Amino acid sequence: MSEEVRKYHEEDAIGKTYDFRVARRLFGYLKPYWRLATVAIFLTLLTNILISTQPYFTKMAVDDFITPKKTDGIWLFALAFFGVFLFRFIFSYIQEILLNTVGQRVMFDLRTELFTKLQKQEVAYYDQYPVGRTMTRLTGDVDALNELFTSGVIDVLGDLVIIFAIIGIMFWLDWKLALVSLITVPLLFTATNWFRKHARRGFDRVRTRNAKLSAFLQEYISGAQTVQLFNAERKAQSRFREINDDYRNANIETIFYYSVFYPLVDFIGAIGIAVVIFAFGYQFLGGFAAAGTALSVGVLAAFIQYSLQLFQPIRDLSDKFNVLQAAIVASHRIFILLDRDVEITSPAEPKRRGKVAGTIEFEDVWFAYKNEDWVLKGLSFKIDLGESIALVGHTGSGKTTITNLIMRFYDVQKGRILVDGVDIREWELHDLRSNFAVVLQDVFLFSGSIENNIRLGNKSIDRERVEWAAKEVHADEFITRIEGGYESLVKERGGGLSVGQKQLISFARALAFDPTILILDEATSSIDTETEQLIQQAVERVMTGRTSLVVAHRLSTIQKCDRIIVLHHGELREIGSHSELLTLRGLYWRLFQLQYSDEKLHVSQDALGGEDTLETSLA
């Protein structure tokens, strides 16, 4: 795989980001649901306060009932203990429902905003970025944010409540023993800081490798037929192993930091408990309890439990920090897409809206997809109302580029394109494109019924018009033979239909929308001769009264066009009717000869008043 293709699949690392700025923007998505979020936070605080009372219940059980062997009131004590945990269960249940509701609504809003942005993004964006990488934004990155909203932020607040509650209770029970218990906290924060720095980079690497893997899979699964046709499976597998290995190593590196951090936290916690036991033994067993301390076995049991509880939320905070970091990385990538400028938009005050009459004019148009690698060079021509124009030239001469520019999928670098005398950059974009219908060589059909693929969700196109359009292009003949007819479901990308059938549906789609300007880009190249003849009849009718552009390599399909534009290396070389261009014996004449090199060529001297004319008949 070339270096250029490798870079196409590469995902840029985020590097250092302004975490708080990104987080502040991210939490802005919670505003519509702040009431639900507030209730969830309140319930979280109550739940964690109840959790922090458990060790104190242990102290009371040991000091008030077990040590003095007292049973009076023990049933009330047990009932209180049961009540605390019952309420803890109820609060946790409601909290989880509320959190997941908020999280799913935020995810819905984000996905909707992303999809809307992608629908508005200019075609050049999809030329630059792989589909797999874009899909990662809508799936993996959004899912990372879901964990943040459903468990990350709220749990962090809950853990902080537990930490402060535990420390307060410990100081209330015995401030000296509390200070001893906190000796190991600096060690814990040191380990947490080490983990935070390394895990941040690890998450970034995992995300970039995941996007790279998704882009590769999307491309090679879509192109599985081509891979098998050219026996390129081994090369594809080799490249996949390389990308998959890179992704695995990135995950293993991140797992390494987890495998060090969690046991280290447990070890530091064990040291803390050991210190507490030693300090208690030194005071209690050494006889220092009489000097004003109120230490008891119940206090020791409570401190051991509180120490375990204290280290658990601190450890959880580190884990939630990773959730936060993963969300920050994911949200940063999402915001890069959302903040990307849509270069092709409607002007603030459009000069033209609505239906076009159908005149098109190119004025000294220069265009390049990249830098100054010009595809079109100083192109100037005019298409009159209702005129049919054919674009002819070698591959790469700029034929399809012209059609893309007219519909403003790209903007020209120099010159201008006029529709009805108005620069297309001054048209309302939606209105401009609604005047076009395009039939491409590579037809794209969506999952759904044949009827929906013809109307494309346009409610103004009723069933009667759908059937009329299908009959006009003779698609009705095969549609009615399919089980379900117009309601028959089309598989992904038209699976189950022949290439010719897909193109017939595409013609029906174009006719149903009744365009002012019709563009046919190699539209009949994949259809057999008999079907092509039927389509040509329908095309000739629909082109009447409309401005039409026909892009074709097969010169037999364009001979009836009013004029033919011959392009060569992005420049207009010849323009005229079929007979006029043959008479010139220029570039078009040579293209005509090359295309019919396998046929017997006859030259007639009298067809055009003495001018040489090429007539062809099959050998």
Image: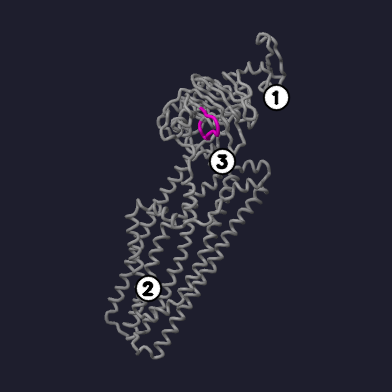
Q: Is residue 514 magenta?
A: no
Residue 559 placement: quadrant: top right
In terms of secondary structure, where does tag 1 sit? helix
Name the quarter where the C terminus is drawn.
Answer: top right
Q: CA distance from mark 3 to mark 1?
A: 33 Å
In magenta, the rendered stretch is 407-417
Q: Position of residue 493 (x, y in %)?
A: 54, 38
Residue 166's label in the rendered image is 2
Point 58% across, 37% down: residue: 369
In the image, is 587 to the left or to the right of 331?
Answer: right
Q: CA distance from mark 2 to mark 3?
A: 57 Å
What residue would you read off at disc 3? 127
Q: Which mark sits nearer the N-terminus, 3 or 1?
A: 3
Q: For the residue marked with disc 3, what is the amino acid? A: Asp
Label 1, residues with CA under 10 Å away: few <14, some 14-19, many ≥20: few
In terms of secondary structure, where does tag 2 sit? helix
Q: Which mark sits nearer the N-terminus, 2 or 3?
A: 3
Point 52% across, 66% down: residue: 195
